[in-house]
Image (cartoon, rainbow, N blue to C red):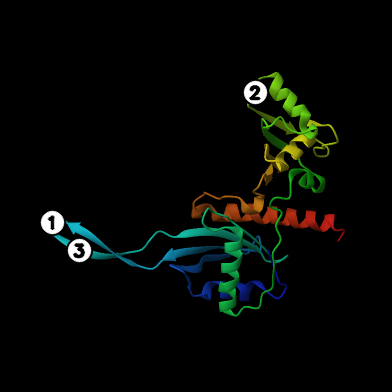
């Protein structure tokens, strides 16, 4: 997602920190934990949802009576990182906060703050490994192939033959590029066939650029699942910001800017 150029860091930080929760169905959505990392020129924070307090009846053994207490349900949160200079935001995706949900809730919250920001949503999710390979210098790829049923197309006959000849249900293969240049997948190579199998649902591929995971089948780095504690947020945020900048540079090169 890109942010409009009229969003300087100070006003954006103040807006993010001042936003009040908004209701949606049985939940309330809010932006919290907003912090500006000056050295990296990035803003980090978390968007999340939580339920209102609810009454719950418990039994107090010491007093031998039932009591009604108020409890808060646990919150669901997603980390986001805003790279202030190119005005881009990268965000975590969870099982409960999908990309479209994050975008819609973030926009609603920012509109409430009356901060003037324009959003352009872009995604490389589902772009396909072969297209990613054409626009990136991929230094390592891991391919997981499962046997197609029925036997499959001629487009991936090499993998089908290997599966049949070894009586295998699946194959995992690693590709590591040479010191200069990235991996290539010319016609008739197994790597290109793996790309065709991916599009048909018979392969999963993960690809790295300079040691950093930037592509996974059906979940690009933009939707990487983060499980680290909040204490590590600075390191994670800086890593994401670097990844976002690489993606931006790659997109610019691909359209000839």
Label 3 neighbourhood size at 10 Å, few (<14), some (14-19), many (20+)?
few
Label 2 neighbourhood size at 10 Å, few (<14), some (14-19), many (20+)?
few
- Could you tell me which residue is drawn at 72 percent across and 43 percent down? 199
Judged by depth in the image, the label closer to the viewer, 3 or 1, is 3
Name the residue beneath numbered marker 2.
168
User: Which quadrant would the N terminus be assigned to in this image?
Assistant: bottom right
Q: CA distance from mark 1 to mark 2?
A: 62 Å
User: Which quadrant would the C terminus be assigned to in this image?
Assistant: bottom right
Q: Position of residue 238 (x, y in %)?
A: 63, 55
Name the residue beneath numbered marker 3.
67
Label 1 neighbourhood size at 10 Å, few (<14), some (14-19), many (20+)?
few
Name the residue beneath numbered marker 1.
62
Nearer-the-camera pick, 210 or 205:
205
- Could you tell me which residue is drawn at 62 percent across and 78 percent down? 115
User: What SS does tag 2 mark?
Assistant: loop
- Could you tell me which residue is drawn at 69 percent across and 24 percent down? 163
Tag of residue 46:
none
- Could you tell me which residue is drawn at 59 percent across and 52 percent down? 236
Question: Reading the chain from its start, which is encountered first: label 3 or label 1?
Answer: 1
């Amino acid at each position: 997602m890109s942010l409009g150029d009229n969003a300087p860091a100070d006003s954006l930080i103040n807006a993010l920190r001042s936003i009040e929760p908004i209701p949606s169905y049985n939940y309330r959505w809010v932006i919290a934990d907003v912090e500006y990392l000056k050295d990296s020129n990035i803003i980090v924070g978390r968007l999340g949802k939580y339920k209102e307090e609810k009454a719950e009846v418990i039994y107090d053994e010491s007093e031998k009576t039932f009591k009604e207490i108020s409890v808060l349900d646990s919150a669901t949160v997603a980390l986001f990182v805003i790279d202030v200079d190119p005005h881009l935001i990268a965000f975590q995706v969870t099982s409960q906060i999908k990309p479209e949900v994050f975008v819609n809730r973030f926009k609603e919250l920012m509109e409430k703050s009356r901060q003037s920001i324009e959003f352009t949503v872009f995604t490389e999710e589902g772009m396909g490994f072969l297209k990613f390979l054409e626009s990136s210098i991929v230094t390592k790829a891991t391919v997981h192939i499962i046997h197609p049923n029925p036997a499959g197309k001629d487009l991936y006959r090499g993998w089908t033959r290997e599966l049949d000849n070894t009586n295998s249900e699946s194959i995992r293969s690693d590709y590591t590029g040479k010191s200069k240049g990235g991996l290539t997948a010319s016609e008739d190579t197994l790597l290109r066939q793996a790309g065709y199998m991916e599009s048909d649902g018979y392969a999963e591929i993960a690809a790295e650029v300079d040691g950093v995971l930037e592509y996974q089948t059906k979940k690009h780095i933009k939707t990487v699942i983060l499980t680290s504690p909040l204490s590590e947020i600075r390191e994670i945020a800086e890593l994401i910001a670097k990844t976002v900048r690489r993606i931006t540079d790659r997109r610019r090169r691909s359209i000839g800017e």
